[in-house]
Image (tube, rainbow, N blue to C red):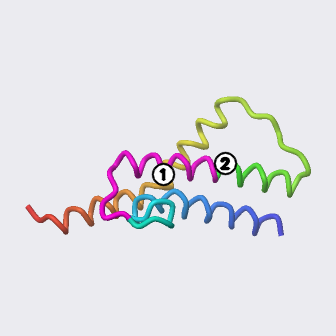
């Protein structure tokens, strides 16, 4: 059962990491005609924080405690979240290129 929670968490992180790049909605609630790269990046940072909070919650639920971590853990987690957002970023770049052919 613990393994299913971990896989579910990884899928949630993948969804949260790609969401800002594949939709023009701000936090899935507010429709925008156009989202700038800065707004997408800020939305991505908020989703990264939400994923971290969900990870802490899952760790507490599964183990009953939260292990203290050094800065290296958080940097590697941030980079893992960046790598998970790569498919959404590629989708955005391909979509922009097809909408504005050179």
Q: Which dot, 2 or 1, sits closer to the camera?
A: 1
Residue at the top extreme of this rendering: 71
Q: Is residue 37 magenta?
A: yes
Residue at the right extreme of this rendering: 64
Residue at the left extreme of this rendering: 102
41 sits to left or right of 69: left
Query: What percent of the width, then of the height, locates residue 4?
Result: 75, 69
Q: Quadrant of residue 12?
A: bottom right
Describe the element under mark 2 as helix, strand or loop.
helix
68 sits to left or right of 24: right
Q: How many labels were placed on the picture?
A: 2
Image point 73% across, 61% down: which residue?
6
Q: Is residue 70 magenta?
A: no
Image point 46% across, 65% down: which residue?
30
- In the rendered structure, find residue 83 and report the number of the disc placed on it: none
Image point 82% across, 64% down: which residue?
2
**Whole-number angstrom distance, CA of label 2 to CA of label 1:** 14 Å
Query: What percent of the width, then of the height, locates residue 20?
Result: 44, 58
Q: Give neighbour class at mark 2: few <14, some 14-19, many 20+ (Cα, 10 Å).
A: some
Can you say which quadrant of the picture contains the C terminus? bottom left
- In the rendered structure, find residue 43 and report the number of the disc placed on it: 1
Describe the element under mark 1 as helix, strand or loop.
helix
**Which residue lies under the disc numbered 2?**
52
88 sits to left or right of 94: right
Can you say which quadrant of the picture contains the N terminus? bottom right
Image point 61% across, 47% down: which residue?
49
Query: What percent of the width, then of the height, locates residue 50?
Result: 63, 52
Task: Write down the region rendered in magenta.
Answer: 32-50
Query: What percent of the width, then of the height, locates residue 64?
Result: 91, 51
Q: Quadrant of residue 98?
A: bottom left
Residue 37 position (above or below residue 30): above
Q: Give neighbour class at mark 1: few <14, some 14-19, many 20+ (Cα, 10 Å).
A: some
């Amino acid at each position: 059962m613990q393994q299913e929670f971990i896989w579910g968490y990884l899928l949630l992180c993948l969804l949260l990491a790609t969401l800002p790049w594949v939709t023009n909605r701000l936090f899935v609630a507010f429709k925008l005609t156009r989202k700038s790269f800065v707004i997408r990046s800020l939305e991505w940072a908020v989703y990264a924080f939400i994923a971290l909070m969900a990870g802490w919650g899952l760790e507490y639920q599964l183990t009953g405690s939260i292990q203290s971590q050094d800065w290296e853990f958080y940097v590697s987690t941030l980079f893992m979240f960046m790598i998970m957002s790569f498919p959404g970023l590629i989708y955005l770049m391909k979509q922009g290129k097809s909408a504005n052919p050179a």
